[in-house]
Image: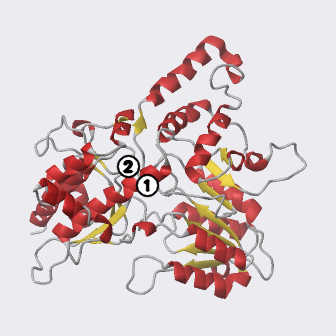
Amino acid sequence: LQQTPPLVIPVLPVSQELNCSPTSRRLAEHLDRHDELQQLRQEFLMPKISDLPPSDLSLVDGSEDCVYFAGNSLGLQPKNTKKYIEEELEKWATIGVHGHLKGSRPWAWAEETLEELMAKIVGAKPEEVALMNGLTVNLHLLMLSFYKPTPKRYKILLEDMAFPSDHYAIESQIWLRGQDVTDSMLIIKPRQGEDTIRTEDIVSVIEREGDAIALVMLSGVQYYTGQLFDMEAITRAGHAKGCLVGFDCAHAVGNAELQLHDWNVDFACWCSYKYVNSGAGVSHTHTLYNTQMELQPGVNGFRLSNQPVLLVCPLQASLEIFNRTSMKDLRRKSVLLTGYLEYLIRHYYTKDPSDPDKPSVHIITPSDPEQRGCQLSLCFSRPIRTVFQELEKRGVACDMREPNVLRVAPVPLYNSFTDVHRFITALGSALNASGRSVQ
């Protein structure tokens, strides 16, 4: 029990009530039966194992649903997506140009009908949310307005191992303003021997270097480690030193409870193909963008054009599902789901010094649920690429990130506790197979 994370201690009394082991599949099935959000899974298309290209049908039953733990990379397709797209194709075929102004989704402003739904997910006002472009395009647009270097205040603070396209965008914006990249990029790293960055260290850097920092630009959830940054504390610290503060929330939106308005975040941008299960890019800001053009008020002034309606359709299908619940309820399930996954991994695969041949798994994501979303980032004592390939053969969809992390994300909208149990079973087989392959 000493190694059991506090948040999953309720698993033990439930298992005692059922008179079964905490690692039994019976427990997972019991938790699923009492899951108030379980019906939302039916709103998505879950791939079958046989449909996944890497599956080895000599090892698994191809007729079963796959274990889809890749929502951090690409969310599942909502069932209404195809219907909505076909409606717009039919409109195009039958009324042509009149579709710009007619129908349930007039193409000229179709995305504007979704801004209120998106605002609820990120904790913003509808007029503070715009649906537009792709993530990196939006990041460039926002930094063009919010990064205003001066001779004394010119640095951008970002985390070590920021997503590569974010790093390159920041680097290019610094170069565009005629600044020295090496001097202007202030990169914060974890302490020696630690996997994630402490909030206190981020705040300390801001307090120490803040007079020279023009922009704090961090992730909401770090894509590699799965760490959820304390955006409220970071924003407060940045503002206290006169810095503007923005976040890339690609891995946070639809995953963590966000209150971007209340936290007084200056701007944020995110994509919606991960936890929001669609394909349209979105952007959020609290600052008005004023020029001599007649722009729409608020953040819509950043839009380059209206969104293609075929990208609006999957976003609508997904946001309608989100609207059947709340981020609070999704987050409550997520904490339990990921906690259950962590419990089972620690139970089976904690490193045992007395048994060096036993496969072990190291979780680099913080154990504190307040410092993570649904993703766990795993390192292995066995060759990671082999483990990944063996998992894929067994119908598990997850992803590997260089140099040595496997990212697994049980998503509360459509994943179940039984999915977690099935993953652990597949992981055991994969680790055994990977051990044989290196002997």
The residue located at (60%, 63%) in the rendering is 247
Q: Nearer the viewer, residue 220 or 434?
A: 220
Q: Say whether disc 1 or disc 2 marks the residue closer to the N-terminus.
A: 1
Amino acid residing under circle 2: Pro
User: According to the image, label 1 marks what residue?
Assistant: 331
**Residue 361 point in image, percent of width and height:** 23, 70
**Residue 53 point in image, percent of width and height:** 26, 41
Q: Nearer the viewer, residue 77 or 412?
A: 412
Q: Is 93 located above or below residue 15 in the figure?
A: above
Query: How many labels, in total?
Result: 2
The residue located at (40%, 66%) in the rendering is 369
Does residue 339 appear in this view? yes
Q: Residues within 10 Å of mark 2 (few under 14, many from 20)?
A: many
**Residue 292 point in image, percent of width and height:** 91, 49
Quarter of the picture containing the N terminus is: bottom left
Q: Residues within 10 Å of mark 1 (few under 14, many from 20)?
A: many
Q: Is residue 231 left or right of residue 141?
A: left
Q: CA distance from mark 1 to mark 2?
A: 8 Å
Q: Is 3 located above or below residue 95 in the figure?
A: below
Amino acid residing under circle 1: Arg
Name the image quarter holding residue 60: top left
The secondary structure type at the circle numbered 2 is: loop
**Which residue lies most toward the right here?**
292
Name the image quarter holding residue 437: bottom left
User: According to the image, label 2 marks what residue?
Assistant: 412
The residue located at (33%, 58%) in the rendering is 336
